Amino acid sequence: MKRTLIQDLKENKDSKISGWALKIRDTKYMIFIILKDRSGKIQVSIDKNHQEDLVKKLEGVLPSSVISFTGKMVFSEYVKDGKKEFLPSNLEVLSKSDAMPLDDTASLDTRLDYRWIDLRSRKNELMLKIQSCFVEGMRDFLLKNDFTEIHTPKLIKAASESGSEVFEVKYFNRKAYLAQSPQFYKQMAIASGLERVFEIAPSFRAENSNTNRHATEFTSFDLEFAYIDDYTDVMDMEEDLLIAGLKKVKEKYGEKIKEVFNEEVLIPSKPFPRIKLQDLYQELNQRYNYQIPDTDIGDMNAETEKLTSRYAMEVYHSEFIFVTDFAKTKRAFYHMRKNDIPQGFDLIWKGTEITTGAQREHRYDILKKQALEKGLGKDIEFYLEFFRYGCPPHGGFAIGIDRLVMLLLGIPSIKEEMFIFRGPSRLTP
């Protein structure tokens, strides 16, 4: 008999179900097991007086064991959760569990030590399904808009993509590095004539950051597209992309997100508010008496991002806001500049930066000059070659998927949102 998911059970039809025994309650006359699979859960009821063979098979079996039952589902007014129960005629213990090392009082570090068990909770299972749905919505939007999905190398020769630290690895008889992003290769794809590309893949940052939103390895959603007029085309594209993803999530999981995470999925309207950095400084100073520290002038910090979201909600009633006109010293060398101002932006959502995007410099001579300004030379010669033989105007951005879902669901730390977290002090499981 083939397995039937719990949600697909039909009344009084012979069926086979398999899953985790969430709870096992042994009473004087009955054994009650709450069985869970990916579709839901159901009470399995065993009569101890008439099903001694099944009772014997359950001797020494603890909660979290994996069990398969054959029998029938019936409706019962005595079952509180779902009004359904499964009456088994046979069972097979597929895998016995030891006593569980986690309980409801376990610390986050302990939960991460046993992440595969921690992920069995309804909340965590739903979280990962929502992440998958969000990505699906954004990927579908790009495919419908003639983007091509690419897969770029994560082992690279040069360590010069940005100011972030990189992980060095031994590559046979020489050094290599783990890629901080697919930026160079996205632009190579534009130079190859693909025009519209995206990638969903791991990125690596060797930053000793121990905040609630940083990880040393994370999943990045990157895109790049050609024949733009200016960087506002890139902002327009991101608006459409995020709206598509949020609509998909709200349609499929909106009610469950409200029930489990107590968060409302709000679909933003276009255009998102847009403000220049210097104008933002003035607004934050006048409204909240906030002065940007000297070391952060020309850029933003965590406190600035929080106040920027507050400003966006109070003035524009928007969860999202674009900030433009950053200092060239704070932006990558490949950002196009006009009047010495980088043609790019940060997108702030719920008090946190989720994107840095820009129009790229596609003219070889200017790009080479800007690279030299940053002290970059031989390491990026291979990258500069992409622009020597013609490259159209283009731009793009990247979104950290884990940070995005963390903010969507109001999860306090990215450690709890990621399938498996990697940080400065964690390399297991």
Image (cartoon, rainbow, N blue to C red):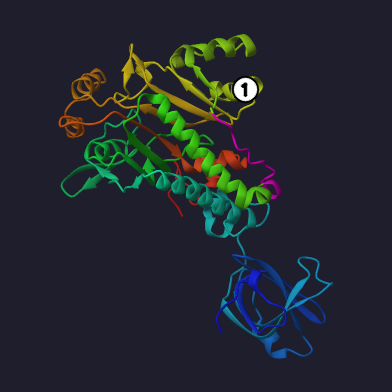
Instruction: Indicate left or right for 368 with 167 as reference.
Output: left
Residue 85 position, x and y percent, is 74, 75
Q: What element carries label 1?
A: helix
Q: Residue at x 23, y 46 (%)?
A: 170
Q: Which residue is drawn at 67% across and 46% down?
A: 261
Q: Quadrant of the N terminus?
A: bottom right
Q: Which residue is drawn at 67% across and 67% down?
A: 41
Number of numbered discs visible in the structure rendering = 1
From this view, report whether residue 247 is shown above or below residue 111. Answer: above
**Which one is nearer the viewer's eye here, 348 or 315?**
315
The answer to whether residue 23 is visible is no
- Residue 163 against residue 37 in the figure, above or below: above
Q: Mark 1 points at which residue?
A: 316
> Which quarter of the figure has residue 286?
top right
Q: In the visual, does 349 lie left or right of 363?
A: right
Q: Give the range drawn in magenta.
A: 258-270
Q: Name the dominant secondary structure of the magenta segment.
A: loop
The residue nearer to you, when weighing 355 against 360, is 360
| Residue lying furthest right | 78
